[in-house]
Image (spheres, helix red, strand yellow):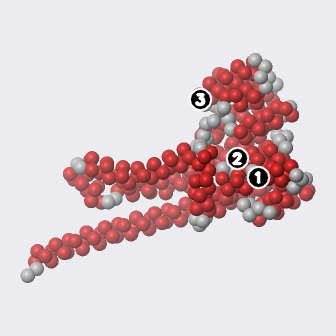
Amino acid sequence: MDLLITPTQLSRRAELYYQLGSLINAGIFLPNAIRQLIENPPSRSYRRPLELISAKVEEGCPFYEAVESTGWLSSFDHSLLRSGEISGRLDVTFKLLSKYYEQKAQMTRKTFNGLAYPVFLLHFGALLFPISSLQALVLKAQILPWFIEKIAILGPIYFVVIGLLLLFKLNRAEPFLEVIERIAYRVPFLGKAQRSMAVARLSVALESLLNAGVTVIEAWQFAAVSSGSVILKKEVLPWKERMENGQTPSELVNSSRAFPEMFRNLYAAGEISGQQDDTLRRLSEYYHEDSARKYHIFTKLLVGVVFAGGALYVGYTVVSFYAGYFKQVNESYGP
C-alpha cells in the first residue's frame, strides 16, 4: 500500500474515484471505465495497478477482490468498495471516497501551509547563523567548512523527520508513535489541533462507511484506523466484542475519555434520533475547522518563538562582538 502524505497525492486519489463514479453514472460499464482510466489516469503511477485490476475484472473477478489482490489501496478503501459492490451502490461508494480524499487533501494542505513559514525561518536561520561562518564563506571562500557545519545542524532534523515518516508505515512502531502523540497532546494548541483532526477524520470515515452499507461494528473499526491516531485506534478496536455483545456505540463513546465531550453528546443524540449521517457530517466539519484554527494559532506562536530566538541570538552576537572588540582595545592601550 502506498503512503499518501501530500495534498497532491490525496487529490489524485480523489480524482480517481471521481472519474470512476462519473463514468459509471454516464452508463459506462465498470470494465470499460477502468480501461478509459488506464488511457488517461490522474497519475502515471496509477496505470500499472489499474492494468492489473482490469485484467482481474476481465477474468470475472469481483472489482473489490481485484483491488485487494494488488495491495495498492488501504483497508479502508477495500472495505468501502466491497460493501458498495455487494450492495449494488458502487457509484455512491466512488462518490463517498472521492469526497473523503478531497477533504483529507484540504486538511493536509492547510497543515502544510501553516508549517511552511516556520520551516522557511528554520532553514534561513540555519544558513545565516552563526555570522562568523557566513563571513568566512563570503570573505575567505571557506565553502567546505560552511557546508559541513550546515549539514551538522540540519542533518539530524531531516533524519528525525524522515524516520518518523517511515515509522508511520510500520505497525510495530505503534507504541513509539503513541508516545509521540501523547507528548504532542501536551503542547499548547498543537495537541488540541491534532486531537480535533483525528476526530474529524474518524467522523468523515464513519459517515462514508455507514453510507456505503458497512455494518456499524466494521465501520467503527475501519474509521478508527482511518483517524490516523494511535490513541483512538487503541481505544476503539477492543469495542468490537462489546458491540457484538449488545452495547451500542453511543454507550461506548460516552464511557470513553478519548473523545471530546461535544462529540460524545452529539453522537448519542444522532444515534437516538436516527440522524447519524447528518450528525457525523456536522461533527467532521466542526472538528475540521477547529483543527485548522488551532493549527493556525500554533504556527503563529511558533513563528513568534523563532523570531524571538533569532533576535536574542543576533543581540547576543552583537554584544559579544563589541565586548571582545573593546576588550582588545583596552588590552592594547592598557598599562
Among the two numbered marks 1 and 2 on one chain, the one whose residue lies closer to the N terminus:
2
CB atoms of marks 1 and 2 within 8 Å: no
What amino acid type is highlighted by mark number 2?
A: Ser
What amino acid type is highlighted by mark number 1?
A: Pro
The answer to whether residue 44 is above or below residue 121 is: above
- What residue is at 73 percent from the left and 56 percent from the top? 235
Query: Helix, strand or loop at disc 1?
Result: loop
* Residue 324 found in image quarter: bottom left
Across and down, in percent, residue 313 comes to 36, 67
Across and down, in percent, residue 196 comes to 68, 58
Q: Nearer the viewer, residue 92 or 80?
A: 80
Left or right, 28 with reference to 196: right
User: How many angstroms separate mark 1 from mark 2 (CA)?
Assistant: 16 Å
Circle 1 or circle 2, nearest the eye = 1
Across and down, in percent, residue 218 comes to 80, 44
- What residue is at 76 percent from the left and 52 percent from the top? 238
- Residue topped by disc 1: 238
Left or right, 182 with reference to 92: left
- Residue topped by disc 3: 45
- What residue is at 40 percent from the left and 50 percent from the top? 155
Among the two numbered marks 3 and 2 on one chain, the one whose residue lies closer to the N terminus:
3
Numbered badge on residue 226: 2
Quadrant (top left, top right, bottom left, bottom right) of the N terminus? top right
Crowding at dot 2, Cα within 10 Å, few <14 / some 14-19 / many 20+, comes out as many
The answer to whether residue 53 is above or below residue 223 is: above
Circle 3 or circle 1, nearest the eye = 1
User: How many angstroms separate mark 3 from mark 2 (CA)?
Assistant: 23 Å
